[in-house]
Image (cartoon, rainbow, N blue to C red):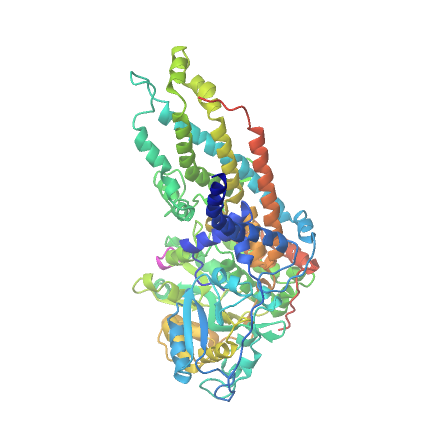
Amino acid sequence: MRHGVGRFVTGFLVLPVGLYLFYVVWPFLQAAGYSLTDWGGYSDRQQFVGLENYLRLFTDELIRKAFWHNVFFLVTVPLCTIALALFLAFLLNVGGREDKAGIRGVFGSGLYKVIFFFPQVLSLVVIAVMWQQIYRADGQGLVNGVLMKIGLVAEDDPITFMYDPEPFLGVPAVLWWLLLIAVWSGAGFYMVLFSAAMQSIPKDIYEAAILDGAGRFHTFFRITLPLLRDTVSVAWVYLGFIALDMFALVFIMTPSQGGPNHASEIFASVIHFNAFQKGQFGYACAIAVALAIFTILLAAFQLRITRRERIEF
Amino acid sequence: MSLTPELDRRTLLRRAAAAGLLVTPAAGLLSACAGSTPSQNNDSTGQKSSDNPFGVQENSAVKVVIFNGGLGDAWAKEDQAIFNAKHPSVTINMSSTQKIKTEEQPKMATTPSDVVMNSGADMMDISTLVNEGAIEPLDDLLAAPAWDSEGTAADSLLPGTVVDGTFQGKFYVVNIAYTVWGNWYNSALFSKQGWEPPKTFDEFFALAPKIKATGMAPYVYDAVHGYYPRWALMATIWKSAGKQAVIDIDNLKENAWRAEGVLPALEVWEKLVKDKLVLPGRLDHTQSQQAWLDGKAAFIQVGTWLKNEMAETIPPGFEMKLSDYWGLGATDKAPNDVYAGAGEGIVVPSKAPNKAAAKEFLRAVLSKAGAAKFAELTKSLASTTGSGDNVQDSALASANELMKNAPKDLVKVKFWDFYADLDKESQNLSQELMAGRITAAQFVDKMQAAADKVAKDSSITKQPRDA
């Protein structure tokens, strides 16, 4: 019987694993191969150049700029998204009044859940195009239009959003505006994720805490957050990936795809410029491979430091 | 030269897959990279004759990809009819798209289309195509007899067309649309107000307060795509500093950006911004053009595709006319040179399976009959002579007028086609200058630094410009 099971499982696995190897793993390896050449992307001429592309990475100013912008997102996107998602999830699940039926969320939480989750059903491109209208830098933009009507913004000096490289707290304004979109579009999903995790926490723990006189603040920080540790750490890793990407928003929304004047340049936009505009596929592949290694290390590191004894309930 | 840099959702998704995903682990590039096995080149040809100079094979098929931007694609169907009238047995498989690079680049190394119109925001970098040997030199097309006129195909072209398509001494790109750039204004409004379109910046600065007094902004430009304001900046530099100065800039000569006349040409733009003569806000090409049509600004600078691009929203009574870019006045070295040239390039990939038919199709595109249809349908001039002779249109007529009085030298800048790094830097700096964040002097310093860096970089193939 054991034999039969083995063959049965193998039979199911052959096709998907084969497809995965061919369409995912093999191209990965190919990219790593191309990263050692000077391939331009339009011909079948390529020369082996060894690690030259990788050495070039360290002297490339644009990469350095992109790196710090990605680090900015790497810190802020998970932090803001998780904080907001946790806050919303807490209010929707256990933040309301307690009564005979026990602990519950704030009034109308079902409706709020749908509203907050809504951005998640939109494709990132739709979100970007929508926010282009919100951020439009003249009186016809949603934000500018409203602020001009109530007199907070002068007609001849609209907020320029995506065209504003002036630093705020040392980071170009355009990055903060992009961060707002990323958090807005991501928080809903993680709110649902955390809600699900919160619902699996037994209500009696809360009730016991409340009987002991714990307020909302203490129930959140002493009970909810520690019990959500696993979920939060997974969310952190996912959001780290998103923060290292950010390509669609930058590509659609910023002037010159990474502008103004490189103020929103990120790894992906530098790869795109080198591969598709400059015709240096080899170098672009080297950046991509370096980024992939960085991402994997980061994920391993994050999972490592957040690992802890699991609590069963 | 791009007509409509627009994004549609599906391509963006595909692009996001191609470059975005890859960032997480390195997936997407690879799907774009994969498959560089050399393909078989079965380019057999039929009998050559003066009527069939490339030896097009009967019953063969040719795949044509048209950029469907500001000029549309209706004109290409007319060329298809002209071609098929001579070669009824050859099948033309024509498709049109806005995403040339996204769709054609992955095929270039294996089995590309036979004819690719390489244009728009998503075009393949022309220098890379040439350096990689990915496209076919078309000098034999120039030497071939013209489709429906005396002499060779080259003889039937407007000045500048051959130069514009020549890279490293060979003719690679057939630019089919003849574009004239300049400052557009509403001549109905101007004659009502008694305003005279200025010829120099001084005249413009004198007129500007009068325009402002009517509640209108004197000037508007596309603040999203850096290459829009760059045309205007470079035209001013050419007029002020002369042709040789721009050739030196294109050739990465030492201190070329510091030549006499370059800085003053940028300083007038700095003044234009500082005096707040630009419509507030940051608009893209169609938004700024619409603002101009809506009477929010008096002048907009752009090429002759404008009328076709905005055809649907031109208000009644609006009479768009083109005037030349402004110069600085008495000190100008080339005050009357017009910014014009052939754009919207068509290329034939080296690995195209049916190159003979591809060249024959291009010969049909350059025919008198095809060019006349092109001008009629797009309200833009074709690069074949005489295309606009029978078209009744005020915008086209004003462009024709401008060309008639223009000296033989045309304003022509090549460095952004030669070097992707300088292309990006000059676009960024043009935006910064127009946003008032850098001065003219800083613009010069930064461009000079970028040019020096490219000049020193041995991994970049240098492209000399002589004329």
The spot of residue A189 in percent (x, y) is 41, 36
Q: Is residue A166 above or below residue B128?
A: above
Query: Range of the magenta residues?
Result: B293-297
Give the camera-side residue of A195 and B420: A195
Q: Residue at x 52, y 44 (%)?
A: A245
Q: Main secondary structure of the magenta part?
A: loop
The spot of residue A221 in percent (x, y) is 47, 20
Give the camera-side residue of A113 and B281: A113
Give the camera-side residue of B161 and A73: A73
The spot of residue B140 in percent (x, y) is 56, 81
Left or right of B7 on screen, residue B332: right
Residue lying farthest to the front in this orientation: A1
Give the camera-side residue of B458 and B13: B13
Q: Residue at x 51, y 24 (%)?
A: A310
Say whether residue B56 is magenta.
no
Q: Residue at x 67, y 56 (%)?
A: B453
Quarter of the image with the C terminus of chain A in it? top left
Left or right of B276 on screen, residue B252: right
